[in-house]
Amino acid sequence: MPPVLTVRILGAGISGLASAILLAADGHRVELIDESFAIPTVGTALVLFSSAQRALDRMGLREEVRAAAVAPEAGTLRASDGRILLTMPADDAVLISRSELVRILWESLPPTVHLGQRRIDDVRPLRQGTDLLVGADGVHSLVRRSGWPGAQAARSRGLTVLRGITDHVPPEISETWGSGWLFGITPLPGHRTNWFACVPEHRTGSIAGDLAHLREVVGGHRDEIDEVLAAASWQRTLVHGIHTAPALSPVRENVVLLGDAAHAMAPNLGHGANTALQDAEALDRSVRLVLGGRTSARAATPLLVRRALRLYALRRALPDQGWQVASDLMMRIAMTEEHADLRDRVLTRVGRFRA
Ligand SMILES: Cc1cc2nc3c(=O)[nH]c(=O)nc-3n(C[C@H](O)[C@H](O)[C@H](O)COP(=O)(O)OP(=O)(O)OC[C@H]3O[C@@H](n4cnc5c(N)ncnc54)[C@H](O)[C@@H]3O)c2cc1C
């Protein structure tokens, strides 16, 4: 019989919850620690591609998530005057509210998972008496800063992101690229609209002020955007910066980084949550492969844990870095100010070629 691992997971975000579900279902002793176990109140949309849905399938949650999501057929990429640059099929992707996804993950946590609500300021005690420490603590990961001392910290990309929800039904799915700004509109279940925008860094000190600034920058270009912004309220808007951290080898001894802790990426390809789910699934699969399926009380050897983590790194390091590089490139293209005309001309040609 394969051994039972004692696993500590710091961070109950998407990757932490998903790995807790999978590892506990295999019989490992899992402690999940977070400073706050609250479900996000403003549930802006996440796109889940088929890769993330496969990871959810391993948790037995794919159908539940799809039932709580909307499945669009296609979306358009538009220039600031409304011209269609590209039409993109959605394939199997679905859109779900972040709070809904977190709620589903929460409700699927096996009762054996031990919850510890506290802020961690020192990682060292977490390593004591633990076979495996999982750093799922997000973009400013303490586990990363402690265990990878030479690694670069997450840095601000000088951009401000605003996201929100309104109650009207969007006419279409679109992302509009202007000169130094972008604005996206997608549906959400319940006949609601999810919107997101990115502008050069600008904070006024209040969300209402940030919304007013956004209206000044992107208003007057397209009626669809003006309609959404007219319906937007500061109470249902989130404002944050974009921070990215260079990807690194996500494994050291018996410590592994998942999700944003390992590879915080620009949001422009919508793969932050997707890679977080895939990481969790790959970690569980690697542990299973090296340790075997069900567990017994026999103590795990550190050697087996390290072998499992090396396998995990082989599976995830390259794809995660690939998404990170591609997302960064997409962010630069989308947000360019000086080359916006050239970009739009090139994309129009690409769109005609694909049609
Ligand atoms: C509002 C919002 C909207 C987003 N929209 C999209 C989107 O549309 N598409 C997309 O793909 N991605 C989106 N993302 C990014 C995506 O959600 C992240 O890439 C993904 O959540 C990463 O998951 P994670 O588990 O790595 O980290 P997180 O979800 O950030 O979770 C980290 C957890 O660790 C906890 N934590 C951190 N440090 C400590 C500590 N010292 N002590 C105790 N607890 C700690 C935090 O409380 C948090 O719960 C969005 C992110 C946010 C915040």
Image (cartoon, helix red, strand yellow):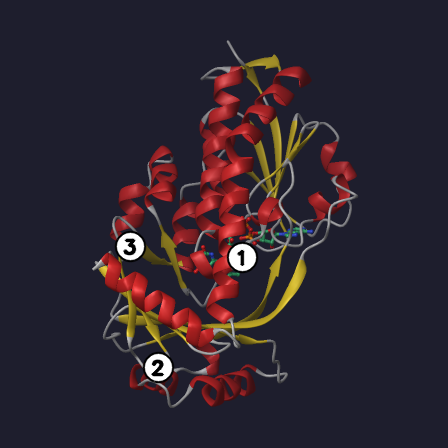
Ligand 1 shows up in the quarter that is bottom right
Residue at 34% across, 37% down: 54
Give neighbour class at mark 3: few <14, some 14-19, many 20+ (Cα, 10 Å): some
Identify the residue shown where x is 53% and y is 23%. 287
In the picture shown, does residue 237 fall above or below 331? Answer: below
Residue 328: give its label. 1
* Secondary structure of the residue carrying numbered label 2: helix
Q: Which of these two is toward me, 149 or 178?
A: 178
Residue 43 appears in which quarter of the rendering?
A: bottom left
Q: Nearer the viewer, mark 1 or mark 2?
A: 1
Secondary structure under the numbered disc 3 in the rendered image: loop
State the residue in front, 221 or 211: 221
Q: Which residue is mark 2?
A: 225
103 vs 348, left or right, is right
Q: Nearer the viewer, mark 3 or mark 1?
A: 1
Label 1 amino acid?
Asp
Place residue 196 in its image quadrant.
Answer: bottom left
Figure quadrant of the C terminus: bottom left
Instruction: Compare marks 3 and 1 and give the one earlier in the sequence.
Output: 3
Q: From what the image shows, is residue 128 above or below residue 300? A: below
Bin the neighbour count of mark 2 within 10 Å (Cα to Cα): few under 14, some 14-19, many 20 and up.
many
Q: Amino acid at mark 3?
A: Ala
Q: Is residue 51 above or below residue 310?
A: below
Q: Amino acid at mark 2?
A: Ile
